[in-house]
Structure formats: structure tokens, C-alpha cells
Amino acid sequence: MSFSSDNFDGLRKLLKWKRHEQPPPGCMNEFSSRVIARLQAGETEAKPSWWEMLGLEFGLKPALGGACAVLVGGCLISGIIVSKNTPNQLARPGDENPGSFPGPGLATTLPGLPAAVPENFASSASSTNPILNPDPSLGGALRLQVKPVNFTPQN
Amino acid sequence: MTDPAPVEPTDPKAARAKPSAAELLGDIGLVSASREGDMAAYDQLVRRYQVRIYATIYHMTSNHEDANDLAQETFIKAYSALKTFKGDSSFYTWVYRIAVNKTINFLKTRKNKTQLSLNDLDFNAEHDPDLLALVSEKTPRRDAALKELQEKLNAALLKLSESHRLVVTLHDVQGLSHEEIAEIMDCNTGTVRSRLFYARQQMQGWLADYLK
């Protein structure tokens, strides 16, 4: 494909007009002095902010801004979900069973609890998974007893 | 690419005065002196290119105040980046590139908030036979016709995308070669030619009433 300029003579003549547009008189006389004065006043190019350095100028790139918002929101939600599902794994150095409470098994030493409490019961407990979580393996020891209430008036 | 001839000072008193040492230096000498903090040398560099840089930005923005601000910021940015200037291209091309990038960034943030603030036409415009031929048939009131045509022309330029407008400005208005424009825009000459072709085609359609 050729990009000949033969057909654009009229337009080129018209565009020549732009050369006749002149800045207001005196505008250019003081121009360099103003630049030098600004430089001597210590004015330099404004330092870009950290998001500008990362190329995250959201004002110029709305799609990028939206994508970043979705990404941050997704990270937050997945963080919450993961923290809910992960057992407490805080352990002291030297613990053989890092998932369990330190010392003798809590469940087996507390009075009143049945002996049938499983070994892994304590390890399944965490701040988000309370110890009183209904567990069928407890054999009904902690199960609530619900009694139906009769509201019919008695004569 | 060779350095363009320095622009004559606009102040007649300055034109008559004996040239200073800075005025006699070439661009490379002035850049070296400016790097060492010689503000007189940098002042000379600014004087050499202020008119062309201002004009390029003005033709891109069609707004005098914006052009003035952006041209000043261009030279401030250039001064703080002087240490990164390696001399692979001329200072002229390098500072042009800074101006172009600044202007394009500005235009992106200004999108849809265009306000014309046009400069006046100089005396020669009223005596240019090519231009008079375009307006004389349209209306008996030549001044009004000239003003109207100036506005139509600027409005048509603003309708172009930034990259197309830049090519038209640099080539058809400022007279730069395809090679110089390619260097400033960091693309090849084929791209410059094709952008120029499509930009002219679009403008020809918009200004058809004046080009019959």
C-alpha cells in the first residue's frame, strides 16, 4: 500500500495555516527566565508516588484499577476462608505433636469427661472451632436435652 | 540527524548585543556545562528550543495556557534528567521526546475536557495566497472567515488520536522529516508514513467543505 501525499495538497496548504498562529507578544521573552527561576527555587520534576512507579495509575487505566480491586478483594476473602479452615498449629519448639495442646492430653485429665474422648479431639480444637462443638463421638455426654413445652392452657 | 540552527532571540536588544560564551557553544557543550550547574548554559539551551517545543505542544493541545505550562515543565524535567542524556541522539530530539511524552500523558488525563485557547494569527496569514484562496469565496467578511477556519482546523486536529495528531503536527505543521519523527516517537518510518496517511485522510473528510 502506498501512502502518497499527492491527494492531500489542499489539506497541506490548510495545515500551513497553523504556522501563522503565534503566542501572545512577550510570552517567549520571559519564558527561559521563568524556567530558570523555577529551577533555582529548587523545583524539579515531582517524584512519582509508589503506585505510579509500579505503573498503577488508576486514573489513566480504569480496567487495571478494577482488576486490582478484584485481586485484593479475592485475596482478603480467601485469607478469611483459609484462616477458618486451618487448625491452630502454634507449637513450642521440641513438641512431638505440634498440633496438640502442651502437656498431658487436656481431654483425658478433665474431670467429668467420658474416657471415650478420642485422641485427636484436642487437636481439632481451635479458636474458630470451639471445644464444645457438637461431636457425635462424645457419646451424647454433652448433648443438649430438649424437652417439648406445652403451651395449651390448662383449666 | 544534524542539530537545527539556533532560533534567533525574539528580543531585538538581545539580538544586537555581543554573543555570550554560552551562545557560541554547541548543544553538547551547553549540555556538559549545564550538568555542572551552569545555569547560563541551560538558559541558552532553553532559548534555542523554547519556540519549537512550545509550538509542538500548542498544536497538540490547541490551548495556549496548557502549552506554556507543559513547555516549562518539559525543560524542568529535561534539566533534572540531563545526567541520563547519553548523546546517542541530539539534544533537540531528546527534549522533543520529553515534550511529546508529557503532552500525551497530559492529554490522556484531560480527555473530554478540551477547551480551545487559540493564539492569534500573525500578520502574514492575511497575505498568504493559499489561505486567502480558501476563505475568500466562502464569505465576504474575511476576518470572520479566517477565525472560523482556524477554529475548524483546530477542532479537526483535536478529533484525531494523539499519535495521529502528533505525526501531522510534526510533519505538516513543523516540517520534520519522517526519520526525525520516527526517532522522536520511537517507531519506524513505515509507521510514521501510515499514521500520516490515515490522519490526513480523516482530516480531509472533516474539512471537506473547505477543500473543494
Image (cartoon, coloured by chain):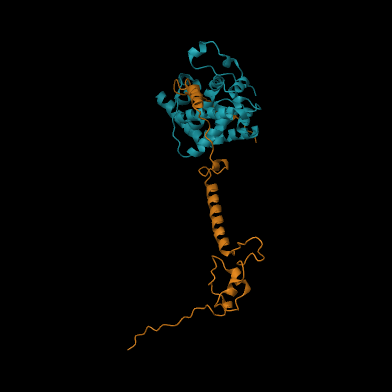
Chain colours: A orange, B cyan
Q: Position of residue A39 (x, y in %)?
A: 51, 26
- Report the front residue among B184 and B69: B69
Counting from the top left corner in percent of width and height, residue B120 is at: 44, 24
Looking at the image, residue A142 lies above or below residue B69:
below
Relative height, residue A105 to residue B61 (above, below): below
Residue B155 shows up from this direction: yes
Name the quarter where the C terminus of chain A is drawn.
Answer: bottom left
Position of B142 compared to B88: left or right?
A: left
User: Residue furthest toward the bottom?
Assistant: A155
Image label count: 0
- Compare residues B146 and A114 and report the one nearer the observer: A114
Residue at x 50%, y 13% (from the top left corner): B14
Q: Is residue A20 visible?
A: no
Q: Position of residue A78 (x, y in %)?
A: 56, 59
Extreme-left residue of the structure: A155
x, y percent for residue A150: 39, 84
Q: Residue at x 57, y 80 (%)?
A: A139
- Quadrant in the picture for the N terminus of chain A: top right
Residue at 59 percent of width and 69 percent of height? A124
